[in-house]
Image (cartoon, rainbow, N blue to C red):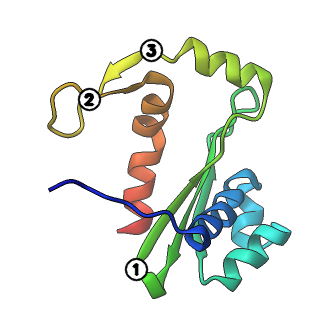
Amino acid sequence: MGITAQYDEALARDYAHASALAYCNAGRVMQGGCRDATKMTEQIGIKPIHSMDNGSGFNPISYTIMLRESKKEIIVGFSGTILTQQLVNEILDAIPVRYRLHLGEGVYVFDYFYTHYLKGFRVDFILKVI
């Protein structure tokens, strides 16, 4: 028995609107001040419950944790690469490292994202959602 997935345009659009919040200033996200992204997520029942950035002007990363209670969803939007220097840093740190948090052989992730996950997001996510 294999795993199958079916593309859903409406769901993809919902997640695109939610992801846009990760590019907005963390304070503005929680105050509803991200204009179209705030308006669109509210219309589809997605509510931000926490937003945070790493406070780095040199290599900024931010994320927003959202809930859509009607579908029992927890949605996390991460900012992507914004600055050229950030892209360079990501490439330089794109070293595969073994993923050690869960059992599984041969699972590797990029060090750049894994480090940020371990240093901040993981604990922050657990504290805000649980």
Q: On the image, which quarter does residue 15 sit in? A: bottom right
**Above-or-below relation of 82 to 91:** below
- Disc ID at residue 86: none
Task: Give the alpha-carbon distance from disc 1 to disc 3, as whole Å.
Answer: 35 Å
Quarter of the image for the N terminus: give it. Answer: bottom left
Q: Secondary structure at mark 2?
A: loop
Residue placed most toward the observer, 67 or 43: 43
Circle 2 sits on which residue?
107
The tag earlier along the polypeptide, 3 or 2, is: 3
Residue placed most toward the observer, 112 or 16: 16
Q: Secondary structure at mark 3?
A: loop
Circle 1 sits on which residue?
72
Q: On the image, which quarter does residue 17 sit in? A: bottom right
Task: Give the alpha-carbon distance from disc 3 to disc 2, as whole Å.
Answer: 13 Å
The tag earlier along the polypeptide, 1 or 3, is: 1
Near mark 3 (Cα within 10 A), the count class, few <14, some 14-19 or many ≥20, is few
- Mark 3 is on which residue type? Ile
Circle 3 sits on which residue?
95
- Mark 1 is on which residue type? Lys
Q: Give the residue at x 83% y 70%.
A: 36
Q: Going by the picture, which residue comes out furthest to the bottom?
A: 70
Q: Is residue 130 left or right of residue 26?
A: left
Near mark 1 (Cα within 10 A), the count class, few <14, some 14-19 or many ≥20, is few
Q: Return the x and y of residue 60 as percentages of the image width and height.
A: 69, 35
**Above-or-below relation of 96 to 19:** above
**Above-or-below relation of 16 to 116:** below
Q: Give the residue at x 21% y 25%.
A: 106
